[in-house]
Amino acid sequence: MFEIEPYRGSFLKGVGIGVVLTICLLFAIPLTLGAFSGRGWILLPAEVLLLMVPAWYFYKASGETETCMGILLVAAIVFLLSAGCSAMVLSSA
């Protein structure tokens, strides 16, 4: 008769998780900056991958595809902003 569609998560839940992980990343940047003597911002895209990929994989494995899309959107925005800022800094030096 009627099938109940499985819970696919929420896009806004994924965006919220991505924002929280990005805020956690902002607290990790001073540690990276100190360890690499001022060049830690170069590692920002790698840090984004280290935080976002496990979260994406966890929600993908649990079947929450909408949540995964939100996490990937935030990761893409942070990555592109980081790349743009890095290009501006390196071009002015």
Image (spheres, rainbow, N blue to C red):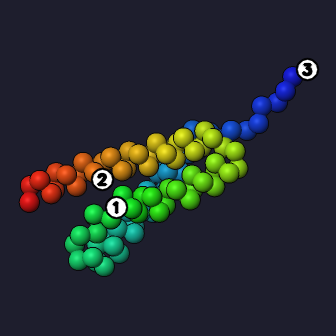
Say which quadrant the N terminus sits in.
Answer: top right
Contact (CB < 8 A) between labels 3 and 1? Answer: no
What numbered label is drawn on residue 44? 1
Q: Secondary structure at mark 1?
A: helix
Tell me the CA gap for discs 2 and 3.
50 Å
Tell me the CA gap for discs 1 and 2.
7 Å
Relative to 84, is 50 on the left or the right? right
Reading the image, the residue beneath label 3 is 1
Say which quadrant the C terminus sits in.
Answer: bottom left
Q: Amino acid at mark 1?
A: Leu
What numbered label is drawn on residue 10? none
Relative to 5, is 59 on the left or the right? left
In this rendered view, identify the residue nearer to me: 65 or 27: 65
Q: Residue at x 49, y 51 (%)?
A: 18
Which of the marked residues, 1 or 2, is nearer the chain's N terminus? 1
Q: Residue at x 27, y 76 (%)?
A: 36
Reading the image, the residue beneath label 2 is 82
Residue 22 position, x and y percent, is 43, 56
Relative to 87, is 71 on the left or the right? right
Q: Secondary structure at mark 2?
A: helix
Q: Amino acid at mark 3?
A: Met
